[in-house]
Structure formats: C-alpha cells, structure tokens
C-alpha cells in the first residue's frame, strides 16, 4: 500500500502543483521543501471466512513539511481535501475507504545556524483495502 499511496499523492494535480516529492519514513537531507513523508504507524487484518482475501486497515501519518508555515498548511489542506473519504485505485491497490482521524501541526527549530526550522502538518489516516 505504501507504493500505491505514493503514486496516488504524486499524481493528484492539486498536490503535485505544490510538490511531487513523496518519501517513505524520512526525507533525504538534500530534499527541497515542501515535501510529504509517509510513515506506516499501524495495521490490522480482518480475516475472510470464504478465503477470497481479507480486509486490511493501515494507518499512515502523512507529514506535509516546509520551512514556511503557510506552505505546510496549504499542502496539508490539499492532501486532506483529496484523501479524506477517497475510494478508488492507488497504484496496484484499490482503496475501499479512507478516514481522516486526526490533524496536527508542529514546528521543529533549525538544527544549524540558519533561521529556518521545519513546519509540519500531520494527517493521520486509516486506509481500508482488500488484500488478495
């Protein structure tokens, strides 16, 4: 599902107008802002009695990051509007439902002598799909 979510976010025009950079777990130090970082935080499997596959729930933290708060918020809003209640294809996966459970914002101060820290808008989403 990670690759499907990356593909889904990179190919959405309102998101790609802001950034096409979507990373898994962490962004490289050389990444230019803004960008998105996906982190898988939880999974749950709901077994099927008929053997045709099972429903899976995966929870992702989608971090929308920038060195400017307005840009992080704009990217977060674009992702939120697009992903909340999404159904359909995500790469080779078919998403049955997406539920936005929480939205948070944070600021990390600079780690060097610059005055640019990192603003983050985090969306916690539950994605349900059939595992075949």
Image (tube, rainbow, N blue to C red):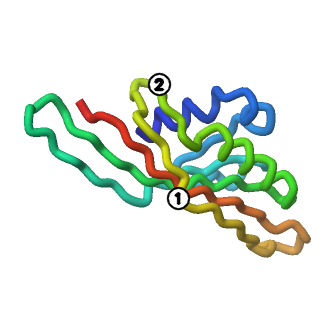
Counting other residues with Cα less than 10 Å from the Cα at mark 2, is it few (<14), some (14-19), or many (20 or more)?
A: some
Residue under circle 2? 89
Q: Is residue 61 left or right of residue 115?
A: left
Query: Image point 15% across, 29% down: which residue?
Result: 52
Determine the residue located farthest toward the right in the rendered image. 115
Q: Quadrant of the N terminus?
A: top left
Q: Earlier in the sequence, mark 2 or mark 1?
A: 2
Whether residue 124 is visible:
yes
Counting other residues with Cα less than 10 Å from the Cα at mark 1, is it few (<14), some (14-19), or many (20 or more)?
A: few
Measured Cα–Cα span from mark 2 to mark 1 = 21 Å
Query: Can you give x and y, in whole percent of width and height, for residue 98 in the image?
Result: 48, 43
Q: Is residue 113 left or right of residue 108?
A: right
Whether residue 25 is visible:
no
Q: Secondary structure at mark 1?
A: strand
All told, the count of numbered labels is: 2
Q: Nearer the viewer, mark 2 or mark 1?
A: 1
Instruction: From the viewer's side, name the closer residue of 105 and 48.
Output: 48
Query: Image point 57% across, 62% down: which residue?
Result: 102
Query: Can you give x and y, in whole percent of width and height, for residue 116 in the image?
Result: 87, 66
Q: Is residue 17 left or right of residue 1?
A: right
Residue under circle 1? 101
Q: Is residue 22 above or below residue 16?
A: below
Q: Secondary structure at mark 2?
A: strand
């Amino acid at each position: 599902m990670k690759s499907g979510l990356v593909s889904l976010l990179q190919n959405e025009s309102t998101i790609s107008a802001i950034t096409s950079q979507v990373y898994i777990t962490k962004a490289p130090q050389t990444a230019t802002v803004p960008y998105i970082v996906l982190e898988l935080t939880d999974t749950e499997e709901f077994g099927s009695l008929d053997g045709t596959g099972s429903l899976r729930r995966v929870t992702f933290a989608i971090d929308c990051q920038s060195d400017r708060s307005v840009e992080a918020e704009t990217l977060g809003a674009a992702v939120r509007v697009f992903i909340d209640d999404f159904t359909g294809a995500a790469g080779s996966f078919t998403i049955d439902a997406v539920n936005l459970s929480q939205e948070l914002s944070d600021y990390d101060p600079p780690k060097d002598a610059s005055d640019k820290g990192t603003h983050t808008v985090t969306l916690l989403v539950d994605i349900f799909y059939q595992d075949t």
